[in-house]
Image (cartoon, rainbow, N blue to C red):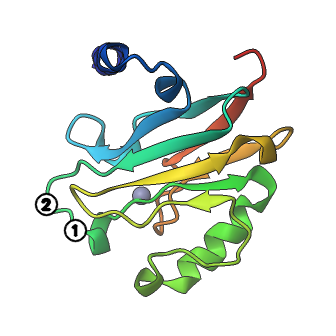
């Protein structure tokens, strides 16, 4: 499935004549009937070092019955050492703040997404070099499963 989608997007980009866009952006699914309600479809995002900015579009594809309040998802990028602090402060901020504590030290964050919603996180790649980065979901109880690594590939 994943390969099919990637091949399709390459075709679409090929027809528009821009390969730049495909290299510096990715889509992460956060919950779907295929991968389960509380999961990302990947455990790793690789960012080519040659990208100036890198966009991560996160999509919640859960059925409508799984409301944002019950099973919302976001994608928060942090330095690994700050993950615990960002998570505990964000959970304490509560659903009314979309489980995100401003100023808690994260690098970037999407909105908290209900079913059918998506949002895009933009990263300035030059600021990420030599940092150990993770992405995770701050919704209470999710980060044990909804977590992955972000790597900068210096060769691409
Ligand atoms: Zn989540």
Percent across and percent down for residue 139 are 46, 67
Mark 2 closeness class: few <14, some 14–19, many ≥20 residues within 10 Å? few
* Residue 49 vertical placement versus 52 (above, below): above
Element type at marker 2?
A: loop
Q: Quadrant of the N terminus?
A: top left
Left or right: where does residue 62 sit relative to residue 149? Answer: left
* Residue 1 vertical placement versus 125 (above, below): above
Percent across and percent down for residue 42 are 47, 33
* Residue 3 vertical placement versus 55 (above, below): above
Residue at 40% in and 67% down:
112
Residue that carries the numbered disc 1 in the rendered image = 67
Residue at the right extreme, as displayed: 130
Left or right: where does residue 124 sit relative to residue 122? Answer: right
Ligand 1's quadrant:
bottom left
Q: CA distance from mark 1 to mark 2?
A: 6 Å
Residue that carries the numbered disc 2 in the rendered image = 64
Residue at 66% in and 31% down:
51
Using the image, tell me which numbered label, if any, was put on residue 4. Answer: none
Residue at 50% in and 34% down:
25
Percent across and percent down for residue 11 are 31, 13
Q: Quadrant of residue 69?
A: bottom left
Element type at marker 1?
A: loop
Q: Quadrant of residue 88?
A: bottom right
Left or right: where does residue 37 sit relative to residue 153? Answer: left
Task: Determine contact: label 1, label 2, CB under 8 Å.
Answer: yes
Percent across and percent down for residue 33 are 20, 41
């Amino acid at each position: 499935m994943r390969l099919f989608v990637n091949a399709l997007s390459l075709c679409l980009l090929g027809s528009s004549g821009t390969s730049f866009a495909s290299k510096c952006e990715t889509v992460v699914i956060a919950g779907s009937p295929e991968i389960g309600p509380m999961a990302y479809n990947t455990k790793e995002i690789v960012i080519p070092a040659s990208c100036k900015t890198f966009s991560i579009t996160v999509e919640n594809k859960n059925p409508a019955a799984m409301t944002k309040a019950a099973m919302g998802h976001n994608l928060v990028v942090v330095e690994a050492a700050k993950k615990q602090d960002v998570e505990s402060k964000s959970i304490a901020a509560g659903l009314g703040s979309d489980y995100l504590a401003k100023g808690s030290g994260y690098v970037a964050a999407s909105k908290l997404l209900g079913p059918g919603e998506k949002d895009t996180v933009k990263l300035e790649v030059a600021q990420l070099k030599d940092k150990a980065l993770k992405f995770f979901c701050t919704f209470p109880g999710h980060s044990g499963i909804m977590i992955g690594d972000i790597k900068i590939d210096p060769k691409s």
